[in-house]
Image (cartoon, rainbow, N blue to C red):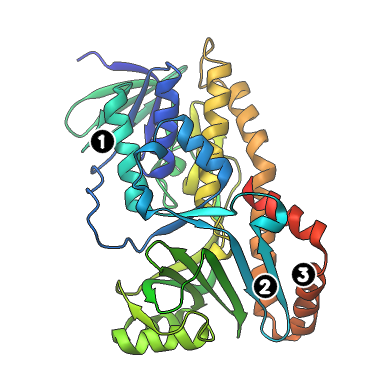
């Protein structure tokens, strides 16, 4: 059987992989996408996986034709963010004060995934192999041959690993990674709230924990509570009323009575550093390339940044072999600093707020930042990029 030849084969059709495939297909490159299962069609229930998408990535998703397919009634702009320390520290980031329309928009993972999938199918520019699993990969001198479990053969100049934190492509390519567990879990759940949130996101730092409330449409909120794994295990087994009361108290009753909408789910928190995100004929994007603490909510935004940067690089060098290391190293250099900076910030903040001896320092620092409007505006611009 003769293989189907592509310039790029992307493994993993999550948010980042699907976006990269859609963008490449729209640029006229020969691209295929491999995924085990198609995404489910969203129903009216709230998704427990919620993302704060930056304006820069919203523009990227609009350019590739995915954002237009989102249900506008399930998109919630964030106009303000109130951050509170464990004593007197507090920072308020306000879109109006910074001279921008909004800080971010909150979307459900499943709905964004469905929009990307619909755009892929409507465009017809991407070879979709789904449901499909990889039986073998064989790297040659200038291309990689991929055998699927149904017998289909693909050949690609470049294989892109978008297959998550436990990336098979990263392992196959011999790209070393270091996983640092935080000894914490993130507990997520959605609630209806009695007091209007008015597009405000809230974040509290206390007792080594980080509690975030992200506003959802319809006066609902999505909670992410980063806490010790033992406490996370306690939270997920509470009944609906007890969990709502616990979250309401931890959030200092800011939005009144809470009513649980979705069961609580916990996931382990960890830092993933990858020594190199490229190898001959291979590039990594998204969670396959890096992992960060969720306190800044920037994991998926970093992934979209990877996708956009890789697409721009591949389009620029489309006349060459896209698996050439000179092309791939240009991509790796472009993404190294944004990823390193975000990992350093989130890792440092985690340790600063986990150390009870540094309480005076972190709270004084927050108060100082809150009284410096130019610095706050700079923080907003950095978060939006």
Q: Position of residue 218 (x, y in %)?
A: 37, 64
In this picture, residue 8 sits left or right of residue 150: right
Q: Secondary structure at mark 3?
A: helix
Q: Position of residue 177 (x, y in %)?
A: 54, 50
Task: Examine the rendered structure and indicate whether residue 319 appears above or below residue 293.
Answer: above
Q: Position of residue 2 (x, y in %)?
A: 24, 13
Q: Position of residue 84 (x, y in %)?
A: 65, 77
Q: Nearer the viewer, mark 2 or mark 3?
A: 3
On the rendered image, what quadrant is the N terminus found in? top left
Q: List the residue tagged with mark 2.
A: 351
Q: List the residue tagged with mark 3.
A: 370
- Which tag, 2 or 3, sits closer to the chain's start? 2
Q: CA distance from mark 3 to mark 1?
A: 55 Å
Name the outermost residue toward the top: 319
Q: Secondary structure at mark 1?
A: strand
Residue at 21%, 25% in the rendered image: 152
The residue nearer to you, when weighing 125 against 285, is 125
Task: Examine the rendered structure and indicate whether residue 72 appears above or below residue 93.
Answer: above
Residue at 37%, 44% in the rendered image: 14
Whether the residues at callouts 3 and 1 have beta carbons within 8 Å, the answer is: no
Residue at 22%, 49% in the rendered image: 40
Q: List the residue tagged with mark 1.
A: 135
The residue nearer to you, when weighing 196 against 346, is 196
Question: Is residue 176 at all visible to an observer of this figure?
Answer: no
Q: CA distance from mark 1 to mark 2?
A: 42 Å
In this picture, residue 335 sits left or right of residue 13: right
């Amino acid at each position: 059987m003769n293989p189907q030849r592509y310039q790029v084969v992307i493994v993993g059709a999550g948010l980042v992989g699907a976006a990269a495939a859609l963008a490449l297909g729209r640029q006229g490159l020969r691209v295929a996408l491999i995924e085990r299962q198609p995404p489910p069609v969203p129903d009216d229930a709230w998704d427990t996986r919620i993302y704060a998408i930056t304006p820069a990535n919203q523009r990227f998703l609009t350019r590739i034709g995915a954002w237009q397919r989102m249900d506008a009634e399930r998109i919630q702009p964030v106009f303000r963010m109130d951050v509170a320390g464990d004593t007197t520290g507090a920072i308020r980031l306000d879109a109006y004060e910074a001279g921008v329309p909004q800080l971010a928009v909150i979307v459900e993972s499943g709905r964004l995934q469905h929009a990307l999938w619909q755009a892929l199918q409507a465009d017809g520019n991407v070879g979709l192999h789904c449901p499909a699993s990889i039986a073998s990969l064989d790297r040659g001198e200038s291309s990689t041959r991929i055998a699927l479990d149904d017998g289909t053969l693909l050949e690609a100049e470049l294989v892109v690993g978008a297959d998550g934190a436990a990336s098979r492509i990263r392992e196959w390519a011999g790209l070393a990674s270091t996983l640092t567990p935080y000894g914490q879990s993130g507990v997520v759940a959605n609630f209806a709230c009695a007091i209007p949130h008015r597009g405000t996101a809230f974040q509290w730092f206390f007792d080594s924990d980080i509690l975030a409330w992200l506003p959802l449409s319809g006066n609902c909120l999505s909670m992410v509570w980063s806490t010790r794994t033992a406490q996370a295990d306690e939270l997920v087994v509470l009944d609906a009323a007890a969990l709502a009361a616990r979250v309401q108290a931890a959030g200092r009753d800011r939005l009144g009575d809470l009513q649980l909408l979705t069961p609580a789910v916990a996931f382990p928190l960890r830092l993933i550093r990858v020594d190199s995100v490229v190898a001959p004929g291979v590039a990594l994007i998204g969670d396959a390339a890096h992992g960060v603490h969720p306190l800044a909510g920037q994991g998926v935004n970093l992934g979209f940044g990877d996708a956009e940067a890789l697409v721009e690089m591949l389009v620029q060098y489309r006349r060459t072999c896209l698996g050439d290391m000179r092309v791939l190293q240009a991509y790796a250099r472009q993404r190294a600093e944004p990823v390193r900076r975000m990992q350093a910030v989130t890792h440092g903040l985690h340790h600063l707020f986990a150390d009870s001896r540094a309480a005076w320092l972190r709270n004084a620092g927050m108060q100082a930042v809150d009284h410096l409007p130019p610095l706050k505006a700079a923080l907003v611009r950095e978060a939006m990029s």
